[in-house]
Amino acid sequence: MQGEVRPILEGLWANTGETAVIFMLDDGRRVSVLDLRTPHKLGFARVLGETEHISKGASGKAILAYVSDQAFRKITAIASPEVDETRLRSDFREVRERLCIDGRRSFYRSSRSCCALF
């Protein structure tokens, strides 16, 4: 997959100057598989293979917006109690309509995740 996605990610990275990352869904967690870091001095360093529950962050929400209802129920069943299923579903509508979501409700409030399905 990296061979197919890398040129697209590199183009996005070159045009924006921002960090560009590919995450994959793995058993209710998002896993970083390709990370091109921003050249700016202030940026977020991520380790390849890093995992976090899929409901965390704008990128996780962007991924969750496209899973089946059955997969969503399975994922939210193993989520921590503070995960708000109603709020996630609201975020999914935003993702599906705009193909992006910002991080206004997450720790990194300035983050923005855009969706591309492969």
Image (cartoon, helix red, strand yellow):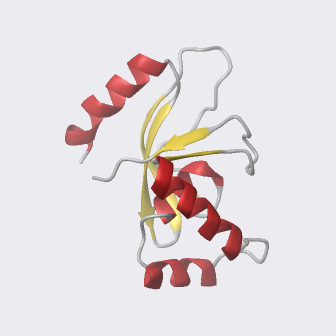
Residue shown at 52% from the left, 28% from the top:
19
Residue shown at 45% from the left, 85% from the top:
70
111 on left or right of 11: right
Q: Where is residue 80 in the image (x, y as percent from the top left)?
A: 73, 74
Residues 5 and 68: in front is 68
Residues 33 and 66: in front is 66
Residue shown at 44% from the left, 63% from the top:
25
Would you place residue 79 above or below residue 99 in this image?
Answer: below
Q: Where is residue 31 in the image (x, y as percent from the top left)?
A: 48, 55
Residue shown at 50% from the left, 65% from the top:
64
Q: Position of residue 28 (x, y in %)?
A: 52, 71
Would you place residue 73 above or below residue 51 in this image?
Answer: below
Query: Which residue is farthest right?
Result: 82
User: Is residue 63 visible to us here?
Assistant: yes
Residues 87 and 77: in front is 87
69 on left or right of 87: left
Q: In which quarter of the image is residue 45?
A: top right
Query: Which residue is farthest front?
Result: 97
Q: In which quarter of the image is residue 46?
A: top right
